[in-house]
Amino acid sequence: MKLDHSGGADQFEDDPERYREPIIAAPNTAGTGSEISRGCVISNAQTAEKKIIFHPKLLRTVTICYPQLTTSMPPAITADTGMDALAHCLEAYCSHAYHPMSCAIALEGMRLV
């Protein structure tokens, strides 16, 4: 989804508290997990700049997971996002910040991919 913010990306980056609208996510790819993240990427098409912002107010209010949204993707994108999901799971499993729960979730994620 796209959100237009008249103040510009720099203004939002400096003061994310000003953003108070609910965020509804409906992912149409599998792999990134961005639909449950507290981060976002703000792109400026004119300068080709991307800014990454993390803030608790960016947690999604609602996430609608509807797997049928992914069925219209080209096979290459389906494969790429599947590999992305696998890489995220492998990264969590191999992390030095060990936690039994994250390892169990990573193993299950790898099994599902």
Image (tube, rainbow, N blue to C red):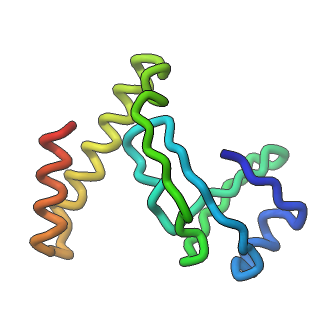
Residue 102 figure quarter: bottom left
Seen as rendered, the residue at the extreme right is 6
- Is residue 18 shown left or right of residue 77? right
Q: Estimate the x, y position of residue 71 in percent, counting from the top left.
A: 43, 22
Quadrant occupied by the N terminus: top right
Quadrant occupied by the C terminus: top left
Residue 51 figure quarter: bottom right
Q: Which residue is painted at 54% across and 78% down in the image?
A: 56
Q: Which residue is painted at 20% across and 48% down in the image?
A: 109
Q: Which residue is painted at 39% across and 26% down in the image?
A: 78
The one nearer the camera, 54 or 62, is 62
Residue 110 higher or lower than 104, as above or below: above
Q: Estimate the x, y position of residue 7 in percent, counting from the top left.
A: 88, 67
Residue 25 higher or lower than 8, as above or below: above
Residue 31 higher or lower than 13, as above or below: above
- Is residue 45 shown left or right of residue 91? right
The one nearer the camera, 67 or 18, is 67
How many discs appear?
0
- Is residue 54 shown left or right of residue 103? right
Residue 72 higher or lower than 61, as above or below: above
Q: Which residue is painted at 79% across and 69% down in the image?
A: 10
Q: Estimate the x, y position of residue 104 in percent, counting from the top left.
A: 11, 61
